Amino acid sequence: MRDVAATAGVSVMTVSRVLNGATGVAPDTATRVERAIAELGYRRNDIARHLRQKGQATRTIGLVVDDLGNPFYSALARAVEDAAYRRGYLVLVGSTNNDPYREREVVTAFSARQVDGLILVPTSGNQTFLSAQLATGTPMVCADRTARGLDVDTVTVDNRDAAMRAVTHLLDHGHRRIAYLGDQHSIWTLKERYAGYGAALAAAGLSVDPDLVCHGLRSRPDAAAAMVRLMGLADPPTAVFGSNDLITMGAIDGLDEVGARVALVGFDDFPLADKLSPPVSVVSQDPATIGATAAQLLFSRIDGNDGPARWVMLLTRFVARGSGEIRP
C-alpha cells in the first residue's frame, strides 16, 4: 500500500480510503490512486487483514503438484486431503505442469491466502524463492521430488535403485536393446530413474544407445509417437522401460498402433495394468502413502516441531505380471 501511495503522490490513509470506498476523496485523487493500483498490480490481502484483526490461523494448507490430471498426483492429493480433513483443515490445490513460473504464481496465490503450511511437488526450477515464506514461519514439505536451494522435510522413494532393478529384470530375461521413454530430464525423479537405467546397463557391460532414449515426453500421445518411431528403427528395441504411468500407457498405445510385441516395464502402477494382455509389469510406489506421509510431516511442523529437516524415503516393489517377462 505504501508503494501505491508513493506512486500516486498521496498518503497511505488516502489509498486506504479509496480501497474501502470511503467518501471525501477528490475524484482526481481517487483516479490517481486507481491508476497506481493498476500500474503496480496491487491486490489487497483481505485474508491477511482479517487474520491481523482476529489473530487466527486459516486452517488451510496449500498443495502444489505437477499435474492433478495424472492419476499418481490425484491419488497423492486425495491422501493429503483426507489427512487434512481429519485435522479440520481444507486443502487448496494447484498444478504447475513443471513450469517454474507457474509454480511461483501458485505459491504466491496460496501465500496471499495465508495458508498455514505448504506441500510442494517441486518443478525442475530453483525453489530458493520460497525462503521468504519459510522465514515468516510457513512450514513446507516436498513430496515425490526434492527441492533445489531449499532445506525442508521431503518424502520420496529411491527412484534410482527402483529403476535399476526394473531394467535389470529386463536384462535378466535376455534383452540387450532396451529403450528408455522419459518425461522432462530436468525433473529430479526422471534424472534419478534415467541414472538407474544407465547403471543397470553399465552393470551388464552395455552402454546407453542414444537412438533408444527419448526424453521430454509430457503426455500419453507424446509417448505413443516416440514408441512408433522407435519401432521403425532398422534395429528396434526388444524391451522398453517407461519412466512413469502416463508414458507407459502411451508406449502401449504405440505398440498397439504398429502391432509390435516387446517386453515392457513401467515405473508407477496404474488402473487396469493387471487386466491388459499381457498384464503390465511395474515398479509400484504408493502415491497415497507419499501424500499421507507428507501431510503427517507438515502437521507436525504446524504443531510446533522445529527440528532439522527430515528426508523420508519410502519403499517400492517390483510387480512381475507378464509384459516384463517377454523374451527377445
Image: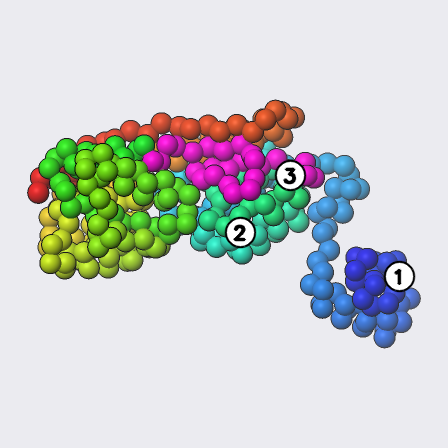
Badge number at residue 134: 3
Please say if 198 is above or below 14: above
x%, y% of residue 191?
37, 44
Residue at 79%, 62% (x, y): give it.
Answer: 4
Residue 144 belongs to the span the image colors magenta: yes
Disc 2 packing (10 Å; few <14; some 14–19; many ≥20) = many
Please say if 57 is above or below 46: above
Do the residues bearing badges 2 and 1 touch, measured as CB atoms within 8 Å?
no
User: Between disc 3 and disc 2, whose residue precedes?
Assistant: 2
Q: Which residue is mark 1?
A: 11
Badge number at residue 103: 2
Secondary structure category for the residue under label 2: helix
Start-end of magenta stretch:
135-160
Residue at 53%, 32% (x, y): give it.
Answer: 153
User: Between disc 2 and disc 1, whose residue precedes?
Assistant: 1
Do the residues bearing badges 3 and 2 touch, measured as CB atoms within 8 Å?
no
Residue at 89%, 67% (x, y): give it.
Answer: 25
